[in-house]
Image (spheres, rainbow, N blue to C red):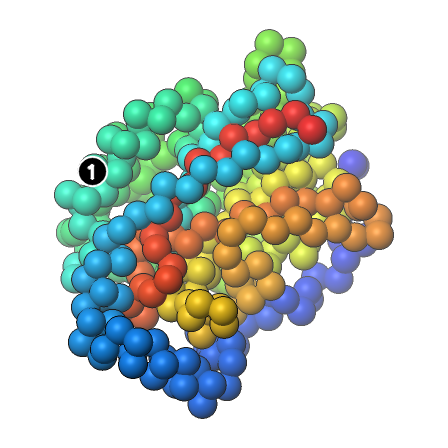
Amino acid sequence: MPYTFRDQVPLNVPSLARSKRGWHWVYSTWISLFALSGAALGLSGFSLWWYARKIEPHWIDWHHCSLPIRGLPRPFDGYRIVQLSDLHLTEGRPLTPIRLARIVIRVNRLNPDLIAITGDFVSQLDALSREGIAQLGGLHARDGVYCVPGNHDYWSDAEELKSVTSDFGLRWLINSHTTIYRNSATLTIAGVDDPWEGRPDLDRALRGAPLNAPVVLLVHAPNFADVAVHYKQIVLQLSGHSHGGQVRIPGLGPLALPDQAWRYPIGLQHIKTKENNRGLWVYTNRGLGMAEIPFRFHCRPEVTILTLRTA
């Protein structure tokens, strides 16, 4: 067997621990309140509330990122992946089916090779979220639309969600993989179950994958990179979950983050180990929707366009 995670890394990876609090302050409560007070004084309280509640949650950042990938076969040079994450569809949230339909149209105009949705489709599976999922059925990519579940999907109705999304052509990668071909060259797209509520199993996900093909891993919680980095074939991990913190103070960063997101909370990072000195790229998408915190400040919702390049 080429993948021997359980022989290398203890299963109780500390960064994957979860608490009863879920979201927690990155800084002390007093520092956080002081930072928020300073921002409020700078903008005025009402202006800050209006901007963070009514403007920024609707102001999507279409973020382009070019990544040099070790061992990427030349036929995949320029391979384009569009990542969506953390839609949190449900009644009363700013990401409505009408807004999502516009996003779908724009994503399709990018002509992506592959679309990845990294969890938390819904906060609650209701009539509105079902309508939003139907809009996702309009997504088109040369090699398909692939997804993994998030913790909120489990807290809603994960099995029903999988059934509904599958009806609209979305393909789940839960401890499994698919192989993308360009002539004789291959790229593996793998996905694991949600680390919070599911049973992620990388050994199972990669069983039977081509040994020499680089692997792009989809997983909801970004801290799972502490596991993925021990698999040398995995060159890129795409995650969500953190929302970037949703409220970020310039010069200070996020005031609060959820469990399993505090090591890689936003954007692009590169990590290494002694055994894997070439390392792993981790990209954490800020998400399109909002969960418990009904504001965004200095942390716009995001659609990520990743272009893979031969290194």
Q: Which residue is mark 1?
A: 101
* Numbered marks: total: 1
Residue 10: tell me if it is visible: yes
Q: Position of residue 22 (x, y in %)?
A: 45, 74
Q: Position of residue 244 (x, y in %)?
A: 44, 60
Q: Residue furthest bottom?
A: 30
Of the 4 image quadrants, the one containing the N terminus is top right
Q: Position of residue 255 (x, y in %)?
A: 45, 74
Q: Residue furthest top?
A: 183
Q: Position of residue 26 (x, y in %)?
A: 51, 76
In percent of the image, x 58 and y 52: which residue is there? Answer: 200
In percent of the image, x 31 and y 40: which residue is there? Answer: 165
> Badge 1, how many Cα within 10 Å: few under 14, some, many 20+?
some
| Mark 1 residue element | helix
Q: Residue furthest right?
A: 274
In percent of the image, x 66 and y 49: which residue is there? Answer: 270
In percent of the image, x 48 and y 28: which residue is there? Answer: 80
| Three-letter code for the amino acid on which mark 1 is drawn | Ala
Q: Is residue 163 above or below residue 27?
A: above
Q: Is residue 280 above or below residue 126?
A: above
Q: Nearer the viewer, residue 16 or 35?
A: 35
Left or right: residue 83 compared with residue 51? right
Q: Quadrant of residue 68?
A: top right
Q: Nearer the viewer, residue 33 or 236?
A: 33
Left or right: residue 61 compared with residue 32? left
Left or right: residue 40 compared with residue 204? left
Of the 4 image quadrants, the one containing the C terminus is top right
Residue 116: tell me if it is visible: no
